[in-house]
Image: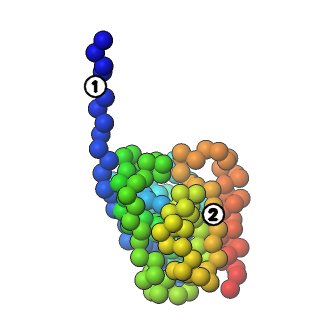
Amino acid sequence: MVKPTILRLPKTRIHSFRPIASRDARILVLGSMPGEASLRRKQYYAHPQNQFWTFMEALFDIRRASPYQERVRALKARRVALWDVLQSCVRKGSLDASIGAEVANDFAAFFRAHRAITHVFFNGAKAEACYRRHVGPQAGATLRYARLPSTSPAHAALSRARKLAAWRAILDAEKRP
């Protein structure tokens, strides 16, 4: 019997985007690494089934159908910053479980440049795990940290309503000093 040949596609090194952040940002939302749709479009959370922009619409009235640059400006106006924990990694596809050979972003420099940040929210477990592994609390020892359920379409363990309820923590953080 002849064994079939299995074609294994190589994983490729991918790179995240620059942060979206105003100097006076108070809240930082961290993902792990943009998925393929986001990388193609060069936009955070570009996959049409990702719920991030849906949640921003519900929380901050930032219209998800608005052009990307308008949404970015609206987030900055609300003093919300976006970034990814990883500067680069090796991954095939979009799943966080496929991430390897991780290189973290420079959070020490980011927090020096954005001293008003008081809260860091992780968009899912992988973002939190990568941050704790590569960055740790020394980058922002006085910050408040919280993990939120992933907005990724791959994370279907919770309903949209339950995820959104958890994401309302950002509104609470916005009101706190």
Please tell me which residue is depicted at 61% across the width and 44% down the height of the picture: 156
> Residue beneath label 2, please?
147
Q: In screen coordinates, is 29 left or right of 58?
A: left
Residue found at the very far top of the displayed protein: 1
Question: For the residues marked 2 and 1, what is the alpha-carbon distance in whole angstroms?
Answer: 42 Å
Q: Amino acid at mark 2?
A: Arg
Please tell me which residue is depicted at 64% across the width and 77% down the height of the picture: 144
Disc assigned to residue 5: 1
Report which quarter residue 87 is drawn in: bottom left
Please tell me which residue is depicted at 47% across the width and 87% down the height of the picture: 112
Image quarter (top left, top right, bottom left or bottom right) of the C terminus: bottom right
Instruction: Relative to 68, say whether 40 is above or below.
Output: above
**Could you say which is closer to the camera, residue 159 or residue 6?**
6
**Mark 2 surroundings: few (<14), some (14-19) or many (≥20) residues within 10 A:** some
Q: Amino acid at mark 1?
A: Thr
**Picture coordinates of residue 169 (x, y %)?**
69, 68
**Mark 1 surroundings: few (<14), some (14-19) or many (≥20) residues within 10 A:** few
